[in-house]
Image (tube, rainbow, N blue to C red):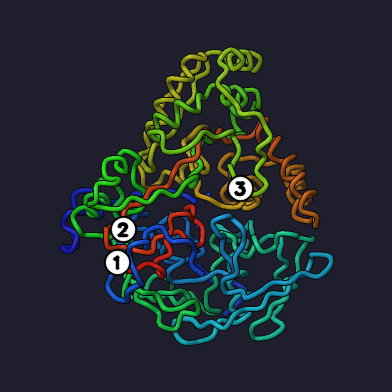
């Protein structure tokens, strides 16, 4: 079962069955512009042709091309090559039109009219309003756990309707000022009305069309010449699964791939400026955290969570686990993004206060299992550093090394404390996907009806300053007693062959121009 085109990947990673990173899984129900470039300064005019091979960590034999199940970074990269959303997030995390040419609200913000651009699926059929509604109804199926379900919750899909072949009236359950962010929700891809077979014959409207797919190994796509945003420069794009970072680096150095996703800071330092490969740093891309389950002991007591906030020495974690390639966090997601509560005091280690809180909670000499895995950069290092920090507060952390293939699914529901990370997304998307009672990827089990009500209040507030005030109130509560101990924000590091041009150097992971292979070319 080895692929002889990639002999260097056989030993480490190419056929592995492990998972990569989150960003937080087929029956239909109810229905039958490029950003700023980072590498093209010396590349001249874009050139057409060639196959680019991109190495990503993958999800093993259980991988799927179903875009509504996209969870790992490789899933999202493949999905955006094959499919489109109505909107996507720009580098500043604002919604940008994609299949939606424009959107317009009524005066009360509870109905939005969306006009589609002229676009076609890979079989030549036009993308219609009915395709959009059926895609959203599939995602919202109550029997399924598709990633974008919670984000689409504001839409009353029974009342929403097509008002023309390319126009839709979305009826909302409540006024929603930032409805474009709903359209840009992660995983809210548009598929043909009757689509069912995503792994052997997926049909999308994206820049590349399907050629082949071997789960856990590779996927090959070919340029779609009629793509609405202009045909890709590349003839073909191949995603190669290489779970270990060393396998991705060795494949890049050996000329077996031209693009390697997610490199370690030490690797970047070793090769940056040396001329053999190019290093691209996407700043402030990945939230780094410890995830505390708030619905079970010991973290069902907020005093224990508050103690853990004070145990963390964030600079030591950034310096040690990320080799300094990042900046410290303050237990809130989205540093630098719109609505981020940057007025809260930066939290620092305070072991005396941590011990006092633990004593108040009756949790002296506390012993907790910390789940980690080599599934993501810095996880094992962060676990070891935090274990030593906790010991100074009288807490014993038993670091448990988990497998890569099931780590993300396991940590959603199991255990009490785990290493966690996230790519970029708007703060309101982070709240809706991870912190509402019915959020599908609620890893901290944060479930508070009054918190849900604040989110709905923010979404219904037309004035932006007033809306920001509600988001600030929500963040103050998370800062005080939430389940995410967010200690840092890591650079996202990519490696490319020297002849790869057009890779955006300013787009955080998960945004529109990240993994934007239709705008990349081989010089």
Distance between mark 1 and mark 2 Cα atoms? 8 Å
Nearest the viewer among 122 and 412 is 122
Q: How many marks?
A: 3
Residue 84 locus on image (x, y percent): 51, 71
Nearest the viewer among 366 and 454 is 454
Distance between mark 2 and mark 3 Cα atoms? 28 Å
Residue 495 locus on image (x, y percent): 32, 52
Residue 355 locus on image (x, y percent): 58, 14
Q: Residue at x 21, y 50 (%)?
A: 250
First along the sequence among labels 3 and 1: 1
Query: Looking at the rendered structure, which numbered label has been put on residue 337?
Result: 3
Discs 3, 1 touching: Cβ within 8 Å: no
Question: Which residue in the structure is indicated by mark 1?
Answer: 52
Classify residue 504 as left or right of residue 134: left
Q: Quadrant of residue 93?
A: bottom right
Classify residue 202 as left or right of residue 497: right
Callout 1: 10 Å neighbours few (<14), some, many (20+)?
Answer: many
Q: Quadrant of the C terminus?
A: bottom left
Q: Residue at x 61, y 58 (%)?
A: 94
Callout 3: 10 Å neighbours few (<14), some, many (20+)?
Answer: some
Farthest residue, direction right: 108
Question: Which residue in the structure is indicated by mark 2?
Answer: 259
First along the sequence among labels 1 and 2: 1
Q: Residue at x 27, y 73 (%)?
A: 50
Classify residue 164 as left or right of residue 281: right
Callout 2 secondary element: strand
- The image shows residue 426, relative to residue 267, as above or below, that is below
Callout 1 secondary element: strand
């Amino acid at each position: 079962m080895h692929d002889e085109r990639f002999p260097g990947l056989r030993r480490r990673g190419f056929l592995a069955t492990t998972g990569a990173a989150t960003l937080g899984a087929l029956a239909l129900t109810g229905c039958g512009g490029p950003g700023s470039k980072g590498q093209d300064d010396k590349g001249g005019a874009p050139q057409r042709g060639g196959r680019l091979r991109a190495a990503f960590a993958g999800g093993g034999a259980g991988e799927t091309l179903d875009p509504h199940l996209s969870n790992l970074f490789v899933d999202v990269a493949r999905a955006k090559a094959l499919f489109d959303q109505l909107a996507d997030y720009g580098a500043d995390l604002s919604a940008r039109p994609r299949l939606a040419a424009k959107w317009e609200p009524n005066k009360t913000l509870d109905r939005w009219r969306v006009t589609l651009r002229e676009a076609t699926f890979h079989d030549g059929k036009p993308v219609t309003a009915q395709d959009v509604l059926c895609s959203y109804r599939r995602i919202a199926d109550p029997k399924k756990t598709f990633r974008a379900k919670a984000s689409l919750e504001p839409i009353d899909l029974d009342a929403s309707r097509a008002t023309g072949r390319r126009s839709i009236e979305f009826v909302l359950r409540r006024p929603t000022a930032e409805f474009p962010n709903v359209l840009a929700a992660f995983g809210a891809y548009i598929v043909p009305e009757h689509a069912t077979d995503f792994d052997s014959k997926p049909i999308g409207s994206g820049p590349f069309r399907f050629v082949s797919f071997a789960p856990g190994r590779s996927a090959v796509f070919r340029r779609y010449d009629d793509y609405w945003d202009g045909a890709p420069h590349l003839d073909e794009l191949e995603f190669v699964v290489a779970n270990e970072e060393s396998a991705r680096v060795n494949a890049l150095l050996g000329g077996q791939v031209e693009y390697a996703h997610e490199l370690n800071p030490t690797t970047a330092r070793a090769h940056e400026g040396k001329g053999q490969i190019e290093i691209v740093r996407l700043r402030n891309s990945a939230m780094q955290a410890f995830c505390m389950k708030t619905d079970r002991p010991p973290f069902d007591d907020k005093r224990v969570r508050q103690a853990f906030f004070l145990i963390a020495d964030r600079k030591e974690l950034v310096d040690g686990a990320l080799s300094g390639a990042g900046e410290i966090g303050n237990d809130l997601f989205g540093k630098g993004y719109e609505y981020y509560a940057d007025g809260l005091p930066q939290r620092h280690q305070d072991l005396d206060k941590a011990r006092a809180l633990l004593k108040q909670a009756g949790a002296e000499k506390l012993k907790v299992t910390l789940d980690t895995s080599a599934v993501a950069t810095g996880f094992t290092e962060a676990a070891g550093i935090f274990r030593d920090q906790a010991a100074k507060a009288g807490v014993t952390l038993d670091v448990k090394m988990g497998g890569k293939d099931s780590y993300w699914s396991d940590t959603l529901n199991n255990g009490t404390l785990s290493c966690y990370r996230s790519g970029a997304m708007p703060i309101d998307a982070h709240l809706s996907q991870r912190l509402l009672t019915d959020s599908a990827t609620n890893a901290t089990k944060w479930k508070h009806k009054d918190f849900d009500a604040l989110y709905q209040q923010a979404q219904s507030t037309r004035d932006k300053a007033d809306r920001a005030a509600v988001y600030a109130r929500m963040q103050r509560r998370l800062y005080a007693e939430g389940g995410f101990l967010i200690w840092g924000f890591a650079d996202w590091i990519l490696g490319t062959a020297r002849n790869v041009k057009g890779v955006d150097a300013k787009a955080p992971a998960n945004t529109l121009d990240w993994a934007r292979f239709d705008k990349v070319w081989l010089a």
